[in-house]
Amino acid sequence: MLGPSRRGDGLVAKLVDFGIARIAPESQPQLFRRLLRLGRTGMEAAHACGDFDLLREAAAVEANAHWWSRLCDLNITFDICQFPDPLFGVQSNPPVSPSVSQSPAQSRAYLETIVPLMLQKTSLGLEETLMFGRQYGLEDEFTAKTYLKMLLLVKNNEESKHLSEEKIRDYAEKASESISRESSIQLLSDVLRLLDGTMHARLQLVTYMLLRHLKEESKEEKKKSKKKSRRVRSNKSTEELLQRHNSMKMYQRLYKILDVLLTFSVPLDAKAVLENDPWCAIDPILSVSTLRYLIALAAPLRLKADDFVVRLLEKSYKHERYCNDDESKDNNTEQLLPPVSFLSEQLSRIKDPRVSTSIAEWVANQYPFTWSFGSEDNDTSNRRLEALSVACDMAARWKKS
């Protein structure tokens, strides 16, 4: 229950004295609708008699009743004792009001917990939530930041099927207009850490927005550094500027990685390949069919394109020989290992002749040399000789280079 009123003749004070804060939850919607009508009637009466105090009190009742009724409709549990005077909100030094028992800071903290609930219940209804925040003095930036974070973290499921990636991009761009650059950079960095690495389109959107803010910030910092006046100095230390520079380089690499993954629909965790050993994510899906577009990741991941081919050959020959022990009991090695033509085809993709010579020799050693004069079962030995011949050709190419 609220504390004693400080202005006993106020309409809101009298309503509070009647114990509105203690009404049963199931009775709240009906009572709030009555309060809404009472507030409007009081405003009309105040206009008629020119009573400003009554008008203010009635307007407060009407505003509170409207939003309390709306929160009830949305099935949001709330405490009316935590709400500030709707006519003055959470400003630092509001006028004394008999309807308010909490400090502005306490009311602000409480209202900030209502905003995400309201966004969630209204399917990210930004306009209505902004109106709610404005009624009680919350800054648009806070509501926009909460909205933007929730929007960018929306998962792709049945509940969000009405939100395509294109709509999310448009809504995000619009919401970001109400947020300062510094706040946007911090928020987007947090979102980037929280997003799943397989949500490529969303990650690329967040990365794009981050890069745009960082580039704008970098341009401003360069302009400040060129000015000789001591009055115009950067607000950031050298360490902070270096950290931002490194972050921008990392985001640029991530953006390029995402561009490849989206172009070829590669099922890779973009964050994992950037932050950890990329081969841990690449090796399981590396195959003849995926090699073509996985090689495109070489530049942004700072890997050698030749290594992709080498690892494919190692995977193809080593895996087939050593990971099929059960099959090898019933099948000979010649049936398990790829043909030499496969080796020649893949070696043609390697640019460095030293690498191609080395891997060709390694492949040749995977074929057992069981050749015997006059035997008809010399297929694996012949294949080893063919592979060694390919290695010799690669060595000759190396010598000429």
Image: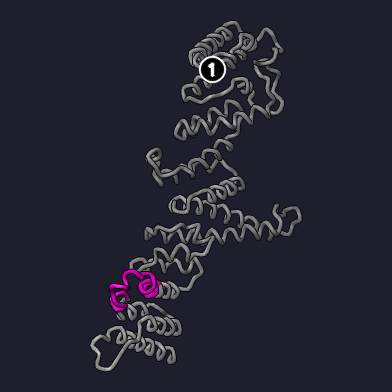
Give the main secondary structure of the magenta stretch: helix
Whether residue 265 sits left or right of residue 301 in the image: it is left
Q: Is residue 324 magenta?
A: yes
Judge whether 274 appears above or below 36 on screen. below
Judge whether 231 appears above or below 335 on screen. above
Whether residue 155 sits left or right of residue 82 in the image: it is left
Residue 119: image location, x then y, percent: 49, 33
Residue 108, picture quadrant? top right
Residue at the (48%, 50%) spot, across then down: 196
Badge 1: residue crowd in 10 Å (few <14, some 14–19, many ≥20): many
Judge whether 157 appears above or below 259 on screen. above
Residue 19: image location, x then y, percent: 61, 11
Residue farthest along the right direction in this orientation: 230
Residue farthest along the bottom direction in this orientation: 373
| Quarter placement of the N terminus | top right
Residue stretch rendered in magenta on the structure: 315-336
Residue 326, picture quadrant? bottom left
Residue farthest along the left direction in this orientation: 376
Name the residue type under label 1: Ala
Q: Is residue 374 magenta?
A: no
Residue 384, picture quadrant? bottom left
The residue that mark 1 highlights is 65
